[in-house]
Image: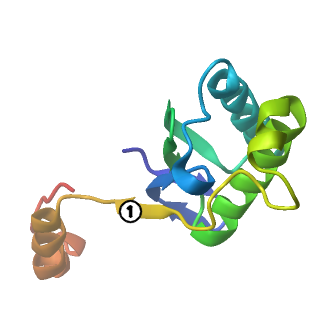
Amino acid sequence: METRRQAHCVYRCEYHIVWIPRYRYKVLTNGVDKYLEIKLDEVRKTYLEIEFIEKKIQPDHVHLLVSFPPKHSIARVVQILKQNTGKALKDKFDFLKDRYYGAGGIWSVGYFVSTVGLNENAIRNYVQHQEKEDLGQAKLEL
């Protein structure tokens, strides 16, 4: 995990995000998965602060390991990803229009997110001994 810097912020924020197509239909096959990957890369070009560390597209769900600055909420980033990919997939593949007829999108409303953090024991150790480290008396590594 790498520390990233911006003008007024240093951060190390990584998130594991999973979402599924509505009704968990296995529609992310036969080229849909490749096109979804292309669309995710296009989102990355538009939103430069969103960085994909890992991507894995399964027939009935999407796994991403993503990093972005703490000024963005996880809900907003997931919304950006799902909105920008869902409409493009539905426009490109006619069978998705038939499968998900009406105004609804192809993605399920919910999602799973988990933070990827440092070792909990390392954090506890740092918090307990950070005063000594700040004074240069202890050498701790996270």
User: Which of the 4 quarters of the picture holds residue 114?
Assistant: bottom left
User: 142 or 37, which lies in front?
Assistant: 37
Instruction: Report if residue 14 is visible in the image.
Output: yes
Q: Quadrant of residue 44?
A: top right
Q: Which of these two is toward me, 53 or 63?
A: 63
Residue 88, given in percent of the width and then of the height, sits at 84, 39
Residue type indicated by callout 1:
Thr
**Is 26 left, or right, of 79 in this rendering?**
left
Query: Is there any visible trace of residue 71 in the rendered image?
Result: no
Instruction: Residue at 21% x, 56% y: name it.
Output: 142
Relative to 43, say whether 6 is above or below.
Answer: below
Above-or-below relation of 70 to 42: below
Classify residue 126 as left or right of residue 109: left
| Mark 1 secondary-structure assignment | strand
The residue under label 1 is 115
In the image: residue 66, left or right of residue 86: left
